[in-house]
Amino acid sequence: MKKIHHFIVIDDDSTNNLICNYTIKRFDREANVRLFEKPENALQVISKEYANLSEARPTVLFLDINMPSMTGWEVLEEFKNFDNEIREQFKIYMLSSSIEDLTQERDQYPFLAGFISKPLKVEKLQDLFNEQK
């Protein structure tokens, strides 16, 4: 599998976005990290930039569950509407500050790769990428 250097973080908490950015850059100096505090903006960028690419752009998307304008679940509902050519470029991980069983919700979104507790840590990124090998 081609190494992923593209990351998108969607979280209304600017501090958490900075932590994610710092952590991802520590994990991969070549990483292209895009941070969004408004999920609507991220969805708009994804729909425009990931459609009709000449070459796939594998991307890891870290998505906060609880946000005021749109929850992470609502973002996933919108993501379902994207063409397969867009969805297949993403591995999506939900970020959560709470520990709860979200198995039932996960079953509704087969393209959801998993859940990660905040804050994001380099060791967790290493685990995620080791699983892909």
Image (tube, rainbow, N blue to C red):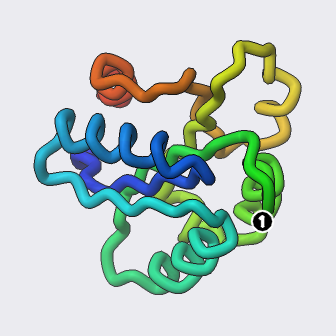
**Closest to the observer, 88 or 15:** 15
Q: Position of residue 124 (x, y in %)?
A: 38, 20
Tell whether 116 sits left or right of 32. Answer: right
Q: Position of residue 44 (x, y in %)?
A: 61, 79
Q: Is residue 123 above or below residue 3?
A: above
Tell whether 81 sits left or right of 60. Answer: right
User: Element under label 1?
Assistant: helix
Count residues near mark 1 (Cα–Cα under 10 Å), then give few for <14, some for 14-19, many for 20+: few
Q: Which residue is mark 1?
A: 78
**Closest to the observer, 98 or 60:** 98
Residue at figure coordinates x 42%, y 28% from the top left: 120
Residue at figure coordinates x 21%, y 43% from the top left: 25
Rendered-image quadrant of the C terminus:
top left
Rendering quarter of residue 6: bottom left
Number of disc labels = 1
Residue at figure coordinates x 32%, y 29% from the top left: 129
Q: Amino acid at mark 1?
A: Glu
Q: Position of residue 87 (x, y in %)?
A: 59, 61
Rendering quarter of residue 93: top right
Q: Is residue 114 above or below residue 21?
A: above
Residue at figure coordinates x 59%, y 34% from the top left: 95
**Closest to the observer, 11 or 3:** 11
Toward the left, the furthest residue is 29
Q: Position of residue 29 (x, y in %)?
A: 12, 46
Rendered-image quadrant of the N terminus:
top left
